[in-house]
């Protein structure tokens, strides 16, 4: 979350001059991500906090460089024919990334031995293979092609573009125009894309703005914003968000319900609900009741109690690879098999919380039919007498935002 403010500053104009301390920070971060298995967002957050003298341009350079090298990791190491293992080899990987982006390297000893002509020639040779060109593991490319067919090519290309930063206006506290005016006074350039959403074009640290401190907006991808609307909530309803996490969609539900009714925010990770509680206070939303799922009894106590039920289930996250590129290198086929089992269990057991006549939304940030349409179809085959599919929607990453799936079902019996 806290990396987002720094990522747009270099998208329009790349930082061409290199500074040893900044590149060294990038190298150290890459080693922690790939050699120690740490998550990229946490590593970058820690790196940015390590030197208070770095300005916004420095921080933007570090964040973008790390994320882009992680994104194009397979393509970069394919150019030299092996994965980096020593610090010098990580410096060379950085140098290769710089060269294929069209930049020139300074005369540093760390870049000795890099032949720019040979690197560009090898780049042209290796990118003929899709899995290398789009920089993904072989098994993932095969799986995507099998499940998505011809659509896979376009989705892969889209997922390798840097993620847009999207804001959702908290209409409980302010208007879209007031938010725009406030942020633009602090140098944040916005483009409205809906009646409540903006794409950030150029800005300073969003989380230091007065608008953020006042709870006037949340950072939330435009695709993610569609889920709460899709649930068709109304003020006064009893809504259960059963996989709430830190609560981006939970907060949106509270806004759409005009702070009237009740939102039960549930999750198996209690610490995430504590973060949600803090965010809800800043947003001025008081109808959210956190409820950790520490046993099956928690679910059973909510039987047939919800007018609306949101199941934003755990998934592979393949629809959000553009903002979490290191997930490509951490995911394994065995995990996908396991997560599909969890998804099937959640929709089967949690659906019992819904009242007769109520509606639930099953949602994922995955683009795979095996996690989406096939899960819903399997559920309907087993519970077809009690539930009916009302509407489903797939959002491709080719539309410019995260890949998402959502299906709205109504309980008949």
Image: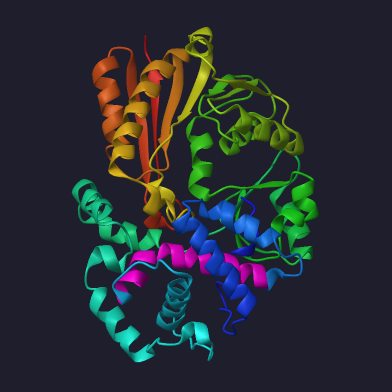
Does 318 sit left or right of 385 as displayed?
Answer: right
Q: Quadrant of residue 388?
A: top left
Is residue 20 or residue 406 the one in the foreground? Answer: 20
Q: Residue at x 36, y 46 (%)?
A: 331
Residue 63 shown in magenta: yes
Give percent across and percent down for residue 243: 51, 29
Q: Which quarter of the picture shows residue 198? A: bottom right
Does residue 65 appear left or right of residue 149 in this picture? right
Confirm whether the magenta stretch covers residue 412: no
Residue at 28%, 86% in the rendered image = 121
Secondary structure mostly taken by the magenta-highlighted segment of the chain: helix
Q: Answer above or below: position of 199 versus 317.
A: below
Task: Left or right? Give the position of 37 relative to 78.
Answer: right
Q: Quadrant of the C terminus?
A: top left
Q: 262 or 158, which lies in front?
A: 158
Residues in magenta? Answer: 58-79
Residue 96 x %, y %: 41, 79
Confirm whether residue 3 shows in the render: no
Q: How many marks?
A: 0
Residue 299 in view in this figure: yes
x, y percentage for residue 313?
43, 32
Q: Is residue 289 above or below residue 258?
A: above
Colour setup of the view = rainbow
* Residue drawn at (56%, 36%) of the image: 249
Please provide percent x and percent y for residue 387. 34, 17
């Amino acid at each position: 979350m806290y990396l987002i403010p720094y990522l747009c500053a270099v998208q329009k104009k790349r930082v061409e001059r290199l500074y040893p301390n900044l590149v060294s920070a990038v190298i150290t971060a890459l080693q922690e991500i790939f050699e120690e298995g740490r998550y990229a967002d946490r590593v970058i957050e820690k790196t940015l906090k390590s030197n208070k003298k770095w300005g916004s341009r420095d921080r933007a350079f570090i964040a973008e460089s790390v994320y882009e090298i992680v994104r194009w990791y397979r393509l970069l190491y394919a150019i030299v024919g092996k994965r980096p293992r020593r610090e010098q080899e990580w410096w060379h990987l950085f140098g290769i990334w710089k060269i294929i982006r069209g930049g020139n390297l300074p005369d540093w000893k760390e870049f000795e031995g890099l032949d720019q002509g040979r690197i560009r020639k090898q780049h042209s040779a290796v990118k003929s293979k899709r899995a290398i060109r789009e920089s993904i593991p072989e098994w993932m490319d095969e799986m995507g092609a099998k499940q998505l067919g011809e659509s896979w090519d376009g989705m892969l290309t889209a997922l390798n573009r840097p993620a847009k930063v999207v804001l959702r206006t908290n209409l409980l506290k302010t208007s879209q125009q007031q938010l725009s005016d406030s942020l633009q006074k602090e140098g944040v350039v916005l483009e409205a894309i809906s009646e409540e959403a903006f794409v950030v074009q150029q800005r300073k640290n969003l989380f230091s703005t007065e608008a953020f401190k006042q709870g006037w907006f949340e950072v939330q991808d435009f695709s993610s914003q569609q889920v709460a609307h899709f649930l068709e909530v109304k003020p006064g309803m009893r809504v259960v968000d059963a996989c709430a996490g830190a609560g981006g969609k939970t907060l949106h539900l509270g806004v759409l319900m005009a702070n009237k009714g009740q939102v039960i925010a549930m999750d198996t990770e209690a610490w995430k609900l504590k973060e949600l509680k803090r965010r809800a206070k800043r947003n001025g939303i008081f109808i959210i009741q956190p409820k950790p799922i520490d046993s099956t009894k928690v679910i059973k106590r909510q039987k047939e109690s919800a007018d609306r039920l949101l199941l934003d289930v755990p998934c592979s996250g393949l629809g959000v690879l553009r903002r979490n590129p290191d997930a490509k290198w951490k995911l394994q086929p065995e995990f996908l098999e396991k997560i599909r089992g969890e998804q099937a269990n959640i929709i089967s057991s949690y659906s019992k919380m819904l009242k007769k006549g109520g509606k639930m939304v099953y949602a994922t940030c995955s683009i795979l039919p095996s996690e989406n349409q096939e899960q819903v179809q399997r559920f309907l085959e087993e519970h077809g007498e009690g539930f009916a599919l009302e509407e489903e929607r797939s959002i491709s990453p080719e539309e410019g935002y995260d890949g998402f799936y959502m299906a709205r079902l109504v309980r008949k019996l």
